Each structure stands twice: as C-alpha cells, then as structure tokens.
C-alpha cells in the first residue's frame, strides 16, 4: 500500500477548458502517482445537453447512452466519457468526438499516443485515474451492506483472503469485503485483466502501487499503477 491519494473535483469549467488539467498530466513523472479526477453525477448532469454530447461523443457512444434504461446510468456513463474525451481531445489537439478509443482483449479502453487512463463510477461518484506513462486502474464503490459477501468472495479469492475478512468483527466484515474488493478490482484493471482473473495470477504479475482514495465517507475507492 502506498498511502492515501487526494482527488481533484471536476466542474463544468474544467471540462470546457481542460488545458490546465492536460498540463498537470504532462508534468507527472514516472515515479509520481496518477492524477485522480472526481465528478459528482448530480452536479454535472446538466452538461449532458444534445450539443455537448454531439461535440464530445461519437455516434457509437451517444447510442450507448440511449441504450441504458435508467437515467442515472446514462448520466454516469455520459459524464465519464465527456471528462475523458475533453482531456484526450486537448492532449491530441483534435475534436473530442474524433478521439479513437479502442479496447484490449479484456475490454480495457485505451488511446494511442495519449495518457493511460481508467474510469470507475458508483452511485453519484464518477472517478478517472490518468497518467502520461504508467498503466493505471481505479475502482470506487458506494458503501453498502453485502449480506452474501462470502459467496461473492469465494468465487474469486483464495481462502486466506476470506479468513482475513472473517477476522474482523461481524458488523464490519461487509465493509472490509468491500475494501478488499476495491483493491482487487483496481489492481486487475491496472493489469488490464478481467474480474475473472485469479488471485494467484495477479500476485504473480508485477506488483502494483496502490493508493486509497480520499473520498466522502459513503464511498470507498483505490487507485493502482504498474
């Protein structure tokens, strides 16, 4: 664990004028942690006008927004993509909607000749980790009680991890499960692996730097970097 990491709140002004953000990203050195951007869904939902969506997103992503049944899901996806494309478009000096974002074998998005990034969202929190030269992963989760955490953990993790969680008092085991889950997902995403990746596979790979994110108390989050 590399300690805690503060986050930069994103507002509409930063999205429309991302030059300052891009400058900050460009100056990050290899041994420095990624820049973490946090957006609030309720506060940023107003940016998702037809004009903004047409300016920032290609047709494929605008169609995907419409495919989400719930408005909150539309907003989470749309805001995350607008934040990402605002930065990448400025970095590449092209229109945000023209940025080519492709997927790896395991579905992790990336962009040629641009910073490395990863997005996560939960509840009203949208988070982006970005670094000019290091592979990153991020996961944020809204804190909630998981009655069947042991069944979920058993599908992915070895017994030693489950025993670790059970060593906590019963009333905090669900929270510790979520804490472990955030670390696991951020790490798998940094490695570019899917959630089906076995714990042993991750452990055998190059070790990640891992930071706990400074978030409101109703959220947990971690960022990882290779």
Image (cartoon, rainbow, N blue to C red):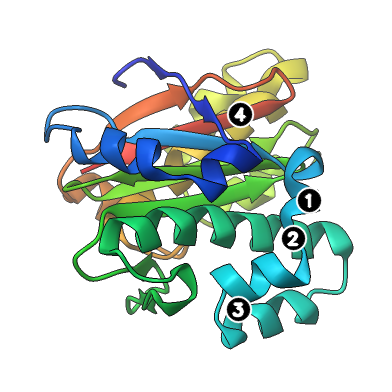
Viewer-proximal residue, 109 or 10? 10
Residue at left offset 83%, top offset 56% = 72
Q: Which residue has dot 2 on it?
A: 48
User: Any mark on residue 61, and which?
Assistant: 3
**Badge 2 or badge 4: first in the primary sequence:** 2
In the picture, the quarter occupied by the C terminus is top left
Whether pointer 2 and pointer 4 mark residues with C-beta atoms closer than 8 Å, the reply is: no
Viewer-proximal residue, 214 or 183? 214
Q: Determine the CA span between mark 1 and mark 2.
A: 6 Å
**Badge 2 or badge 3: first in the primary sequence:** 2
Q: Which is more foreground, mark 4 or mark 1?
A: 1
Q: In the picture, residue 103 is in which quadrant?
A: bottom left
Q: In the picture, residue 35 is in which quadrant?
A: top left
**Badge 3 or badge 4: first in the primary sequence:** 3
Residue at left offset 35%, top offset 63% = 193
x and y percent of residue 52 in the render? 67, 65
Q: Which is more foreground, mark 3 or mark 4?
A: 3
User: Any mark on residue 45, and which?
Assistant: 1
- Secondary structure category for the residue under label 1: helix
Residue sitting farthest toward the right: 70
Q: Which residue has dot 4 on it?
A: 220
User: Any mark on residue 76, and which?
Assistant: none
Whether pointer 1 and pointer 2 mark residues with C-beta atoms closer than 8 Å, the reply is: yes
Q: Disc count in the image?
A: 4
């Amino acid at each position: 664990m590399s300690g805690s990491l503060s986050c930069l709140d994103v507002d509409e002004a930063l999205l429309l004028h991302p030059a300052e953000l891009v400058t900050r990203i460009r100056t990050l050195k290899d041994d420095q942690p990624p820049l973490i951007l946090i957006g609030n869904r309720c506060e940023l939902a107003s940016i998702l006008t037809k004009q903004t969506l047409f300016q920032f997103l290609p047709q494929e992503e605008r169609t995907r927004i419409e495919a989400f049944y719930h408005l909150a899901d539309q907003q989470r996806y749309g805001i995350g993509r607008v934040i990402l494309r605002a930065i990448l478009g400025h970095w590449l000096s092209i229109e945000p909607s023209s940025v080519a974002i492709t997927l790896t074998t395991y579905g992790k998005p990336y962009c040629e000749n641009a910073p490395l990034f990863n997005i996560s969202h939960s509840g009203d929190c949208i988070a982006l980790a970005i670094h000019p030269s290091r592979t990153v992963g991020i996961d944020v989760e809204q804190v909630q009680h998981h009655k069947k955490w042991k069944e979920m953990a058993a599908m992915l993790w070895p017994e030693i991890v489950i025993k670790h969680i059970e060593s906590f008092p019963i009333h905090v085991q669900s929270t510790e499960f979520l804490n472990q889950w955030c670390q696991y997902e951020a790490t798998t995403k940094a490695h570019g692996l899917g959630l089906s990746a076995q714990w042993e596979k991750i452990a055998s790979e190059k070790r990640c730097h891992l930071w706990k994110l400074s978030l409101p108390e109703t959220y947990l989050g971690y960022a990882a970097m290779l």
